[in-house]
Image (spheres, rainbow, N blue to C red):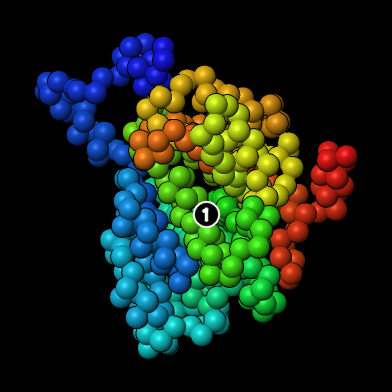
Amino acid sequence: MKFLKKVLEEDIGIEEDIEMTPDNKELLEYIQQTKARIVVVGCGGAGNNTITRLTTEGIEGATTIAINTDAQQLLRTKADKKILIGKKLTRGLGAGGDPKKGEEAAKENAEEIKAAIQDADMVFITCGLGGGTGTGSAPVVAEIAKKLGALTVAVVTLPFEMEGKVRMRNAMQGLEKLKERVDTLVVIPNEKLFDIVPHMPIKMAFKVADEVLINAVKGLVELITKDGLINVDFADVKAVMSNGGMAMIGIGESDGEKRAKEAINMALNSPLLDVDIDGAKGALIHVMGPEDMTLEESREVVSAVSSRLDPEATIIWGATIDDSLEDTLKVLLVVTGVQSRLEITPDGLKRKKKDELKKIKRII
């Protein structure tokens, strides 16, 4: 049982080639018809950058939509569908950093947005909070998606402190609005990236922030859509992410001899996962690795997470093969239901004092 893929093929009977009998043909057609329809919507500049990368690199089983008030930026964006919002309000010139304009622009084109996501079972909304278009339009898109009955998940970044207090205040107001309109809100505090890579040049900091956002969205979407060694049902994901509340992510990778242990430890101790997870409601784990990833490695990752969570927490995990990783094993961890440990303040997302004391005691 050297390879996880081999284990599944031999022990569970998963075959690479399926004989096209009438029954199998009918089953395949049924699978295609009932497959969860997933849409990824990128709002504003950072959201459009994410959509361009996802569309260029390919994101399996999902449709990409770019929304913007800036016609020039939207023109350069690569997406399955583009929606220029607020044509009357902004005349394609952007929202000028004003979230109110971004919100009104999205409302102006609400019917077009609704038509674009009408048949989706799940809608991912991604943006960088703090600016005008993303901050203002993302909650409007979320509200439309929720009313249509789609499982609605937002994956957003918070600004770097160097971007100023006004931008952070805008971001916190947008975060508060999004929290009320989505099932799960995954938050990536950009400032924490300096804890991972200290003394980054400004240009590099924004590139790293984009990369983390792209990895988070792609990892979450393909956990559901990509045929893997351990597949995750949409119903399972829904169980964790319906009313999942605020969520934080941890990302880890390693190509060492103990790569599974090192990757999950990196994810669990990631500065991005800036909260004690023992009271979390649930976790989604996506283990990605090359052809030689073993079942034991996947189990090691899941065990490390389950040992830290409440025994009643729901844990959903999947494993996919990605040959581009070569010898590297990569882990994406999303921990849901952590809002009770965090406080939304005008200056940013802060740990509650009780949780901060707990962290200090653990370190001591």
Q: Nearer the viewer, residue 207 or 74?
A: 207
Residue 120, image x, y percentages? 36, 52
Residue 341, image x, y percentages? 75, 49
Q: Residue at x 71, y 61 (%)?
A: 349
How many callouts does the rendering have? 1
Q: Is residue 3 something that shows in the picture? A: yes
The type of residue carrying mark 1 is Val
Q: Nearer the viewer, residue 146 or 95?
A: 95
Residue 207, image x, y percentages? 50, 63
- The residue labelled by disc 1 is 212
Position above or below: 184 against 19: below
Q: Nearer the viewer, residue 214 or 243?
A: 214
Q: Residue at x 73, y 36 (%)?
A: 278
Horizontal side, residue 353 vs residue 97: left or right: right
Position above or below: 301 against 244: above
Residue 214, image x, y percentages? 46, 55
Q: Residue 342 is drawn in which quadrant?
A: bottom right
Q: Residue 40 is drawn in which quadrant?
A: bottom left
Q: Mark 1, residues whose alpha carbon is within 10 Å: few (<14), some, or many (≥20)?
A: many
Q: Residue at x 36, y 40 (%)?
A: 324
Q: Nearer the viewer, residue 81 or 204?
A: 204
Q: Residue 113 is drawn in which quadrant?
A: bottom left
